[in-house]
Amino acid sequence: MKMNFKAKKFNRKAVLAAACLTCALGVTACGRNNNNQNQDPLTGEDMSHQENEGASEEDSPQQGADGQDGTAMGEFDQMLKDGKNDANSIIDYINTNIVDAGANEIEKFFAGLLSFGDDVRNIDFTKLNDSRQYMPEDMIAFMDLMKLESDTPSMVMSDTENRRVINMTLSEMLERALLFEQHIKKYPNAVTTEAASRLYEEIATNAISGGYNKAEGIAHYYKGDSDDVIDKEALQYYQQFADANADSNLGRIVKEYIGVLQSNDFKINDSMEDFYKSLHQRLDVKNLTDEAAEGTV
């Protein structure tokens, strides 16, 4: 809390008394203020925690947004448990309650929303635009990524094939996957990390394997003249990406894949399929979070 003081000619006792009175009033005012008014809009750091360190247990933000022993969080948890609401209902609840919520509650709100439904891409995050000012940086960054996925989806539903199919060029797929990798590295232990890692693995896997699935009879998206051969023109795009992003996890995987392509003369054989099967482990989010912890990012 910033306060302006003007110098006045009072005796020492008067000054001390005024200072004590000002501090007392300041603490009272802080206790009444909205917690989020003191939250950094960029980093999401809840500055009010520093002011409330001496607060009593009754005044602790752990009680919940409404100060009724976690009633607001209890209602939110019940909404998720009932499963009768759609994502828009959850978003409406967040928009209504986020203004008076503390940092921990906001995190729980967002985690609950991300756990709602089968695919996080079905959530319209733009409906949370008015609440962005109360959210920490990782949530804002994740919503921006989801807007990209909404505006230009990496995968779309095909009516003719009755399944989701690749909707981007190879270069675009690789770049989109890289954006999610960068998010995970920057926010390795955030509420958005798990959802971002799932999308990262899916998009990166499709960019490398071309959606190929022998068991289901799905041909490689970047196939050549026949279903068992990959178009050699794809090599230049993989090479460009690997060279430009040599320090990224995906860049290293793509570089290794280039070697597999060349050694197998671009034919989809057992060796190629084994590499595709290994992508889950190679794209494991733990590889990225370990790098972030070691300060290699």
Image (cartoon, grey):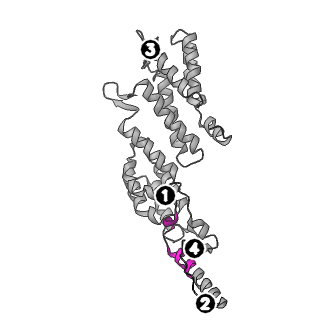
Q: Secondary structure at mark 1?
A: loop
> Which circle's residue, 3 or 1, is located before the other in the chain?
1
> Looking at the image, which residue is at 51% across and 25% down?
241
> Which circle's residue, 2 or 4, is located before the other in the chain?
2
> Which circle's residue, 4 or 1, is located before the other in the chain?
1
Position of 283 compared to 158: left or right? right
Q: Secondary structure at mark 2?
A: loop
> Looking at the image, which residue is at 54% across and 14% down?
261
Residue position marked by numbered label 1 in the rendering: 41
Q: Secondary structure at mark 3?
A: loop
Whether pointer 2 and pointer 4 mark residues with C-beta atoms closer than 8 Å, the reply is no
Residue position marked by numbered label 2 in the rendering: 10
Is 134 magenta? The answer is no
Position of 283 compared to 203: left or right? right
Give the image location of residue 230, x and y in percent: 46, 13
| Distance in Å between CA atoms under marks 4 and 1 | 23 Å
How packed mark 4 is, by other alpha carbons closer than 10 Å (few <14, some 14-19, many 20 or more), is few
Residue range highlighted in magenta: 25-39
Residue position marked by numbered label 3 in the rendering: 233
Residue position marked by numbered label 4 in the rendering: 59
Give the image location of residue 197, x and y in percent: 54, 38
* Between 122 and 295, the one nearer to me in the picture: 295
Q: Tell me the mark number nearer the camera, choosing from 4 and 1.
A: 1
Tag 2: residue type?
Phe
Res 233 quadrant in image: top left
| Distance in Å between CA atoms under marks 3 and 1 | 46 Å
Residue 237 to residue 144: above or below: above
Q: Magenta stretch mostly in which secondary structure?
A: helix
Tag 3: residue type?
Glu
* Between 92 and 244, the one nearer to me in the picture: 244
